[in-house]
Amino acid sequence: MMARIVTVDLGERSYEVHIGHGLIESLDAVIPAAASRVAVVTQEAIPVDVVGALGDRSVARFMIGPDEQAKSLSTVEELCRGFVEFGITRRDLVLAVGGGMVTDVAGFAAACFHRGVDVVHVPTTLLGMVDAAIGGKTGVNLAEGKNLVGAFWQPRAVVCDLDVLESLPERERRCGLGEMAKYHFMTGQDLLALPMVDRIAECVQIKAEIVAADEREGGRRAVLNYGHTLAHALEIETDHRLAHGEAVAIGLLFAAELAAELGRIGPERVDEHHRVVIDEYGLSGDLPTGVDPITLVELMARDKKALSGLTFVLDGNDGLEVVPGVERGVVTSVLERFGRR
Ligand code: GLY
């Protein structure tokens, strides 16, 4: 099957996202000719070797830690110090090979180093391909919250080689499906009916259009956070035992219940959320045991996307939109009811 190419149209910073099989072999073609050194940022457990595809460039590999704790400013400092030692200049390149954590951290290091060097992303998870590697959001966590320090730094190219998904653990696959289900509610498109290359390409296309229209999330881009307000709170409250895509699946169902409570959608649309997320995508919509609704509401109120009070992306007659100032009492009672389902 032919590869699909989706362009993220951002004027002189436009770039292509290549989606297909066997693409890593021709990775060199998307790397600027002037880059004589490539800093590959990846993790020990990622079984993807890109070095043989980089021609006669000088290559160094930089490993980052396996879990969310490595998504930190100290990892960025370590990477940047390694880049100095390797001799990375502004003409060279950072190549991020991994899931969303790797592309976020490596992208942020690239954005900061020498005030910005090129980065190419090779996402190795479904979630990375349909979301994290596209659109230029980079960043790290602070003890106070997720992704609180970061930059918009668009990659030069993104290469989604579906061969790497063959070894993807089942749980990681489900996490990707959580993000993919989100796109269903933006377009109503039956993505699961498409072959995998087209399915990923359609998600990338939806995201590319939104990013092209609102790169820095002044407005419309926020709809990409559908289901994420509760999801981020759940990730923190469970100390990341619940993975991002799993939390998004729950967040989508909760957002539908909340929208119904506020009179924005009817029961059929809530049922559609359950049918798509649980029956079609095969995900769980249950709150993990032991999470406290009051604590979750507290965490949601601290969400960095909150503009005024509790802020959610909610469905309605005009599709998804950002709804600020949702009453705390309403959110708490819907969440308590949601937990008892
Ligand atoms: N993951 C949401 C965004 O890129 O805006």
Image (cartoon, helix red, strand yellow):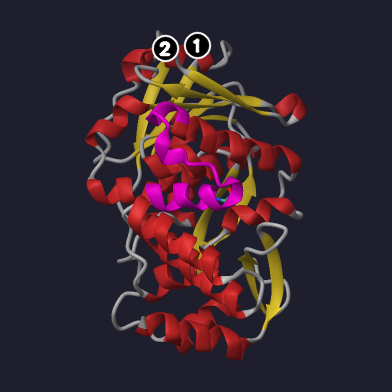
**Which quadrant of the figure contains the C terminus?**
bottom left
Q: Which mark is residue 83?
A: none
Element type where label 2 sits in the image: helix
> Which residue occupies 64% across, 55% down?
223
Instruction: Determine whether label 2 and label 1 are within 8 Å by CB.
Output: yes
Q: Is residue 267 left or right of residue 96?
A: right
State the predominant SS element of the stretch in magenta.
helix
**Tag 2 residue:** 26
Q: CA distance from mark 2 to mark 1?
A: 6 Å
Residue 274 drawn at (x, y percent): 42, 63
What's the magenta region? 177-198
Q: What amino acid is found at the position of numbered circle 1 in the picture?
A: Ala
> Which residue occupies 56% across, 47% down?
188
> Which residue occupies 46% across, 17% down?
3
Q: Dividing the picture into quarters, in which one does residue 250 lie?
A: bottom left
**Tag 1 residue:** 29
For label 1, the crowd category at 10 Å Cα-Cα, with few meaning under 14, some 14 to 19 and many 20 or more, is few
Element type where label 1 sits in the image: helix
